[in-house]
Every structure is written in C-alpha cells, then in structure tokens.
Amino acid sequence: MKTEIHPELHEIAVHCACGNTFKTRSTLTDIDVSICSACHPFYTGAQKFVDTAGRIEKFESRYQKKKKA
C-alpha cells in the first residue's frame, strides 16, 4: 500500500437537528444532519401525515372500493 495518499481519519461528533449527538469516524471534521435514526419515522415507528389541501381525503375517495348495489 502506498504511504501518504490516504486521507486522515478523525473521530467526530455528528449533530442532528433534533438534538441527538453520536460519535463516528470520518475524513470530515464536522457533520450536521437534519434527520437521524433517533427522529426518522422509519426507525421510530411514528408516522406524521401532513395534509395539504385535503390530499389524503382526495386519495381515499379516489381509490376507495366501490360498493355493490
């Protein structure tokens, strides 16, 4: 392996917008993220629906099962 061609690896703290902080190693010196595993809906199981102008109702009415007469 060639010497002096690899970037320097630092142990850093990653800061999330939710306030969570964790340590990792990276070639960067500082990482700020907007969403992490502590606040992401996929990992937490919490779902947030943002209903903009009745889109959810519009979707449900469009794809609801038709009743037999």
Image (cartoon, helix red, strand yellow):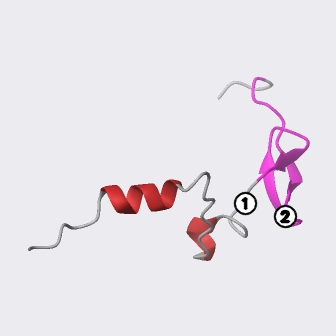
* Magenta run includes residue 13: yes
Percent coordinates x, y for residue 50 in the rendering: 63, 59
Residue at position x 9%, y 73% in the image: 68
Circle nearer the N terminus (1, 2): 2
**Label 1 residue SS:** loop
Vertical comparison of 21 with 2: above or below: below
Residue at position x 55%, y 56% in the image: 54
Left or right of 58, for residue 68: left
Contact (Cβ within 8 Å) of mark 1 with mark 2: yes
Say which mark, if any, is on residue 44: none
The residue tagged 2 is 18
Tell me which corner region of the image, top left, top right, bottom left or bottom right, holds residue 24.
bottom right
Q: Nearer the viewer, residue 24 or 17?
A: 17
Percent coordinates x, y for residue 22 in the rendering: 83, 64
In the image, the segment drawn in magenta is 5-34
**Label 2 residue SS:** loop
**Which amino acid does the dot numbered 2 rest on?**
Cys
Farthest left residue in view: 69
Q: Nearer the viewer, residue 42 or 65?
A: 65
Q: Nearer the viewer, residue 9 or 51?
A: 51
Percent coordinates x, y for residue 52 in the rendering: 62, 52
Left or right of 32, for residue 5: left
Residue at position x 22%, y 67% in the image: 65
The residue tagged 1 is 36
User: Where is the C terminus found, in terms of image quarters?
Assistant: bottom left
Left or right of 46, for residue 61: left
Neighbor class of circle 2 (other Cα within 10 Å; few <14, some 14-19, many 20+) is few
Tell me which corner region of the image, top left, top right, bottom left or bottom right, holds residue 62.
bottom left
Vertical comparison of 11 with 40: above or below: above
Residue at position x 66%, y 64% in the image: 40
